[in-house]
Image (cartoon, grey):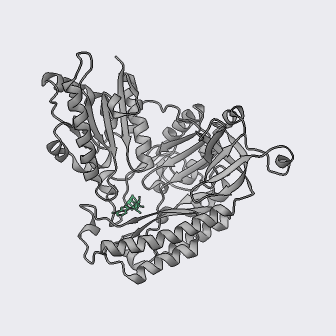
Amino acid sequence: MAKTLHIKNYGCQMNVYDAIRMSDVLEPLGYRQVDTPEDADLVILNTCHIREKAAEKVYSELGRLRTLKQDRADGGSEDRAPMMIGVAGCVAQAEGAEMVRRAPYVDLVFGPQTYHRLPEMVARATRESSQKRGAGRGIIDTDFPIEPKFDFLPDAKSQGASAFLTIQEGCDRFCAFCVVPYTRGAEYSRPAADVIAEARLLVAGGAREITLLGQNVNAYHGTSPSGPSGPSGQSGQSGGEWRLAALAAELAGIDGLERIRYTTSHPRDMTPDLIAAHGEIDALMPYLHLPVQSGSDDMLAAMNRQHTADDYLNIIDALRATCPDIALSSDFIVGHPGETDADFEATLDLIRNVGYAQAYSFKYSPRPGTPAAAMEDAVSEELKSERLARLQTLLNEQQISFNETFVGRSLPVLFDRPGRSDTQRAGRSPWMHSVHADFGTAAEAAAAFGRTVDVRILSAHPNSLAASPVRGSDAAQQEPATV
Ligand code: 5AD
Ligand code: SF4
């Protein structure tokens, strides 16, 4: 019987991938996706726990869903099943049983490592709720199973021209402020053969760009396609493991795959082979998100980042030596416990030194159970806000001047999103700009969709570039289009 599913997603790109895979798992049960919770038989909140008040936001969203569920039950027609509510992701993992205690109308609570078991969970919840006339007992599955969920997921479906592929999960770095090692668990890398097979499916489904995902993706060390005792990857790793550089080189050989990206990386795992890969693999895009969090060595030590500001700057120099046009992005935290004015100034200095194309910045928020949450010398909210504003002003200036350097240039853009009108399409430049192009006619816009097309940049905005297609004599002076 046809059933409807609505997944509300929060947080990082890994959650986007997980949400796609949850719907893949549920499809054989007859679930099709709908846009609103009102229309859904099963609503899943795929939550994020990384920053402030995550759990509170989820509980207030659950309060709204409770009303919907109740309305459905009250006005329920015989042929419509009771609405089922699931909570997935890192808040579910962290809260577990507490969640069904506080919100007893929740039917399923499951973590990021168990969603391959959704069909059994849904079946159990359906049985239990029919026995109890709508008042199911919440099913909790926040295991870290020995068997990786990836072995139980169905084949990947098409995601369009730009696709996500999770290759690594969890983290063993234990930054003092970060909840990820507790919610996503220990570092795990998928075997290279599985990643390659999934990439091929995505490319067969129209992907021209694949973003390899992992909480600490450049720590990737998957079993090589020839097995654990087989030869190591081209970059000289032992024990039949491939690191990210070897995997990227292999993926670059897939016919039709034009672009490879990876995110998020830790500076300590930016190994020489991976830095070199940026100069060797054309498909590796000249853009890297490499969070530094702070420019102060004292703060980096307090954060347990295991590197200094100079170490980071040396990595940036090495990357620029192999790939001169590489654009950089980072995450920053202001107001970590103990951060002084001098520490904060050191962060501003590092930003001036690097020159970022874009960045994300956050006020520190204590995460329960993390070492930083127990640290003294908390920074006041007022000071955090003040520092964040100064930091963001500087980052915004850098982003705007980076974007302005592209005006008048012709760039290959992969158009993977609809535009504001039928003559427009939106896509990404190699440097991750969001590019909006007007093709003049709906037919030309449609022809560009899902492909890489050279466009001329007309103007730069803080968060995007405006473009028009390169034509005629214009095109003759440019590199040929990559399609
Ligand atoms: N407070 C503020 N920001 C945080 N991040 C992670 N944990 C915290 C926290 N407790 C930020 C880091 C990380 C990004 C994903 O979220 O900058 O790189
Ligand atoms: Fe969290 Fe640090 Fe691991 Fe990134 S590297 S996921 S910030 S513990």
Q: What residue appears at the point 60 percent right and 64 percent down from the top-left corner?
A: 400
Between 38 and 454, the residue placed more toward the observer is 38
Q: Choose top left, top right, bottom left or bottom right for residue 424.
A: top right
Q: Is residue 323 visible?
A: no
Residue lying furthest left in this view?
132
Q: Choose top left, top right, bottom left or bottom right for residue 272.
A: bottom right
Where residue 32 appears, as percent x and y from the top left, is 40, 26
Between 383 and 320, the residue placed more toward the observer is 383
User: Total number of numbered labels?
Assistant: 0
Between 435 and 141, the residue placed more toward the observer is 435
Q: What residue appears at the point 39 percent right and 23 percent down from the top-left corner?
A: 28
Where residue 50 appears, as percent x and y from the top left, is 34, 56
Image quarter for ligand 2 equals bottom left
Say whether residue 284 is left or right of residue 230.
Answer: right
Say whether residue 323 is left or right of residue 315.
Answer: right
From this view, report whether residue 72 is shown above or below residue 12: above
Q: What residue appears at the point 15 percent right and 33 percent down from the top-left corner?
A: 137
Where residue 139 appears, as percent x and y from the top left, is 20, 35
Q: Is residue 85 visible?
A: yes
From this view, report whether residue 200 is shown above or below residue 354: above
* The C terminus: image quadrant: top right
Where residue 222 appears, as percent x and y from the top left, is 47, 48
* The N terminus: image quadrant: top left
Residue lying furthest bottom in this view?
342
